[in-house]
């Protein structure tokens, strides 16, 4: 199995346990105790295989991981102390939940840094085949890893290999501690040598005791995995060189193709620009003609409107003048008629007055004659 995927699966398993604890109610004492016991076991195994196998291999074969590995070891050290305290603490203790919460926060921070920075560097350097063989070594290490925290034990090679293996056997109630531990140290040295491409693996154990035999067996099995990892690394290197050469050829062809495509695109753009210019010119001419026609129509409309306005303005004045003349004419006619009637009346009156005067004078003359 891919080493990075194996470690990430461990992270997922622990995260699920964290969520179970966070979702448990305040009175779920037994559930919390059971979940914390599982957390202790999972983290103890995970920390051990990283410190015994993964970190040493990464530090020896991947540039730029030295500080990351040392920081991770220190974070493991803090977690182990908290785990050892939780292992002995009663779940009803007022600090139990608080301690688990702090543990969860620390582990999540550690996981975020490993998966975000550490693991990608290792993956890009070792390649898939070497990672598969490293994953097999981690899986084998799990079988002998301690299931409980041992914060006072060494946490870097070779001490952690010996003490960790011994603690793992003791935790699982086994024997032949010395032989397994000696074989584990040699196996990790072989794995590192093979991944780095070295042809000088560690000297095999020569002890003839049972512990020595177990050590040789352990080393032999691990060496097989180490050889596979080395071969995989060699294949990965060859594959990388081949892929690089192929990529260079592809890049060259791609550059030529890009250049040709760019040239065609330039021609197409030039042609399109010319066509667009012609089309724009035509549209501009049509627009100019339309504007001219519109201007002419607007001028004619304005003139017609002006004439209509003038006519409309003259009509009331003409009517007013006609009305004024007609009124004046009627007034003059009426005045003349009135003057004529007045003259006629005056003449008639004068004639009657003259006639009356003559008649009176005649009667007066007749009267004087009779007298």
Image (tube, helix red, strand yellow):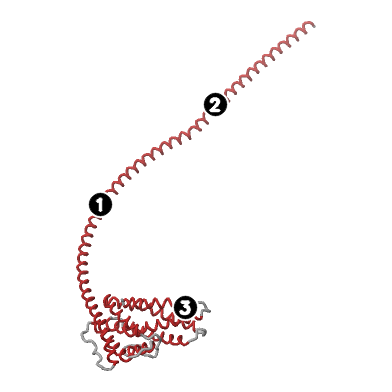
Of labels 3 and 1, the one closer to you: 3
Earlier-in-chain disc, 2 versus 3: 3
Q: Is residue 103 left or right of residue 250?
A: right
| Residue that badge 1 annotates | 274
Classed neighbour count for the residue bearing mark 3: other residues with Cα under 10 Å, few (<14), some (14–19), many (≥20):
many
Classed neighbour count for the residue bearing mark 1: other residues with Cα under 10 Å, few (<14), some (14–19), many (≥20):
few
Numbered tag placed on residue 21 in the rendering: 3
Depth order, front residue of 242/15: 15
Alpha-carbon span between mark 3 and mark 1: 72 Å
Numbered tag placed on residue 326 in the rendering: 2
Q: Secondary structure at mark 3?
A: helix
At 22% across and 82% down in the image, what residue appears?
197
Alpha-carbon span between mark 2 and mark 3: 117 Å
Residue at the farthest front position: 210
Q: Is residue 305 left or right of residue 144?
A: right
Q: Is residue 29 left or right of residue 4?
A: right
């Amino acid at each position: 199995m891919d080493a990075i995927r194996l470690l990430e699966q461990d992270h997922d398993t622990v995260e699920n346990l964290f969520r179970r604890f966070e979702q448990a109610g305040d009175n779920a004492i037994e559930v919390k105790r059971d979940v914390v016991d599982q957390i202790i076991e999972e983290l103890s195994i995970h920390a051990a295989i990283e410190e015994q196998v993964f970190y040493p291999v990464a530090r020896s074969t991947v540039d730029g991981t030295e500080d990351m590995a040392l920081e991770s070891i220190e974070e493991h050290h803090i977690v182990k102390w908290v785990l050892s305290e939780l292992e002995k603490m009663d779940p009803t203790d007022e600090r139990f939940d608080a301690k688990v919460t702090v543990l969860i926060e620390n582990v999540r921070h550690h996981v975020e840094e490993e998966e975000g920075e550490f693991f990608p560097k290792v993956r890009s350097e070792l390649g898939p085949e070497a990672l598969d063989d490293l994953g097999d070594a981690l899986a084998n290490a799990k079988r002998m890893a301690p299931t409980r925290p041992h914060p006072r034990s060494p946490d870097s090679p070779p001490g952690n290999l010996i003490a960790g293996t011994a603690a793992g056997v003791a935790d699982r109630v086994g024997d032949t501690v010395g032989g397994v531990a000696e074989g584990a140290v040699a196996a990790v040295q072989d794995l590192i040598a093979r991944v780095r491409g070295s042809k000088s693996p560690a000297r095999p154990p020569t002890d003839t005791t049972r512990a020595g035999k177990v050590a040789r067996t352990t080393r032999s099995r691990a060496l097989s995995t180490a050889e596979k990892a080395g071969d995989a690394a060699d294949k990965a290197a060859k594959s990388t060189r081949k892929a690089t050469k192929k990529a260079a050829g592809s890049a060259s062809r791609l550059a030529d193709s890009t250049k040709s495509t760019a040239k065609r695109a330039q021609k197409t753009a030039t042609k399109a620009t010319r066509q667009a210019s012609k089309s724009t010119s035509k549209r501009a001419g049509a627009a100019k003609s339309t504007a001219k026609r519109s201007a002419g129509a607007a001028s004619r409309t304005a003139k017609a409107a002006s004439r209509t306005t003038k006519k409309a303005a003259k009509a009331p004045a003409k009517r007013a003048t006609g009305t004024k003349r007609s009124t004046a004419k009627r007034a003059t006619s009426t005045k003349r008629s009135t003057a004529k009637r007045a003259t006629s009346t005056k003449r008639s009156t004068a004639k009657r007055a003259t006639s009356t005067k003559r008649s009176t004078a005649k009667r007066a003359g007749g009267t004087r004659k009779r007298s």
